[in-house]
Image (spheres, rainbow, N blue to C red):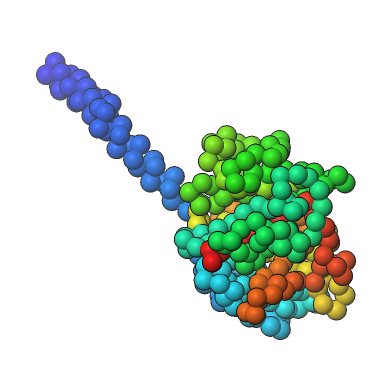
Amino acid sequence: MKYQYRLYLFVFLLFTAFTQPGCSKKAETEKAKVEEVIVEKGVDHPSTEYVSLIQKNTDLIKTVNTNVTSTPSAGIEETDITCISAGNVPMAIFLLKVDLSDPNISMEACMPNDKNAYGFQTVRSMITAKNASYTNREVIAATNGDYFNELGVPLGMVYRNGVLTRNHQDKYYFLSILKDNTCVIGDNKNYISYVTRIKEGLGARYLLVKDAELTTAGLDENVEPRTAVGVINSKKLVFLIVDGRRTGYSAGITLADEAKILKAIGVRDAVNLDGGGSSTFIVKNSVGGYETRNRPSGDVERAVANSWMIMRKK
C-alpha cells in the first residue's frame, strides 16, 4: 500500500511539474530557439570563396577561366566567373550579394516609369526612372524580375513601398523585403503571415532551394539563360545570373544546376526569376555610368514587366 501511495505521488508530482506555466513557457522558449536555428540555416560565405565553393560542392565546373570579385558599393559585392562546365561548354556566371544590414542599402521593386501600372520597359530605362524619383538615394545595381504575360502583367505579386499592386497568386512564390528591411522567400503557406509586413515584393515562378535543400525534382531540364535569387539569412541575399544561348561564350544552365550553385554558396531558400532573353544584370560603375554586366541573349536588353533595384543612400 505504501509503495502504491509513493508511486501515485510520484506520478502526480511529475504531471504537475510538466503542466506548470513556467514549464510551458520554458518549452515555448526552447521551441522558439529551434525555430530560430531553422530560420537562419544559410551560411554567409565571403564572395571571394564562391567559385571554390561551387567547385567543392558541385560537379558543374571543369575549368575556371576568370574569377573576379568587386565591391560596387559598401554593402554590395559582385562576383563574375567565366568557366568551362563539366559538359565542356563555356559558362558565364554573375553573383551579386546584397547586405541589408548596411543602413544605407535597400531593395525596391520597380515597374515601368517607376509607376504602379503594368507595361514593358528595359531594366536600364527603369533605372533612369527610379533615379529620377528620388534625390536622396540612387540605384547601384539592378536585375530583371518576375515572369509576365503578353500585356506586361506579372504572373506573381507586386508590392511597392507597401502598396499592393497585384496580389500573390496561388501555387506561386515570392521574394519580399519586409518593413524592417529583412528579406524572405515565401509561398502560399506563409504569405498570410507576411502580408501586413511586406514593403517590397515580386513573384517568382519556381522554388529552387528550401531550408538549404534542393527542390528541383520534376522541373524542366532546358539549358537557358537564367536569373535567380537566394536568401542566405534575414539580412543577406544573392542574385545569380547565368548567360546563355551564346555559342562560344555561355551556353546557359538548367534550373537544377542553377539551384546547385545557390545551395553550394550557402543560401537557405532560393527561387527562379524570369530568364531567357529577359535576364539582365546592370551595375553602376566607378565613373557613374551603368554597365550591363551580362550579355542578354537577344543582343539587346528586353523590355520586361518589373525589376529589382538595389539602392544606396546618397
Foreground pick, 153 / 231 = 153
Above or below, comparing residue 162 to residue 259 in the picture: above
User: Which residue is at 65% across, 80% downward?
Assistant: 287
The percent position of residue 245, horizontal first and vertical second, equals: 86, 68
Q: Position of residue 205 (x, y in %)?
A: 73, 48
| Residue found farthest to the top | 1
In front here: 310 or 250? 310
Is residue 26 among what the camera can see? yes
Q: Is residue 275 above or below residue 242?
A: above
Query: Looking at the image, which residue is at 69% across and 75% down?
Result: 289
Residue shown at 53% from the left, 47% from the top: 178
Q: Farthest residue to the bottom: give it.
A: 65
Using residue 120 as the reference point, say whether residue 308 is left or right of it.
left
> Is residue 228 visible from the viewing direction of this image?
no
Q: Is residue 94 above or below residue 203?
A: below
- Assign the N terminus to one quadrant of the image: top left
- Residue placed at 80% from the left, 56% from the top? 121
Q: Which of the 4 image quadrants contains residue 4?
A: top left
State the image coordinates of residue 290 (x, y, percent, origin top left): 70, 72
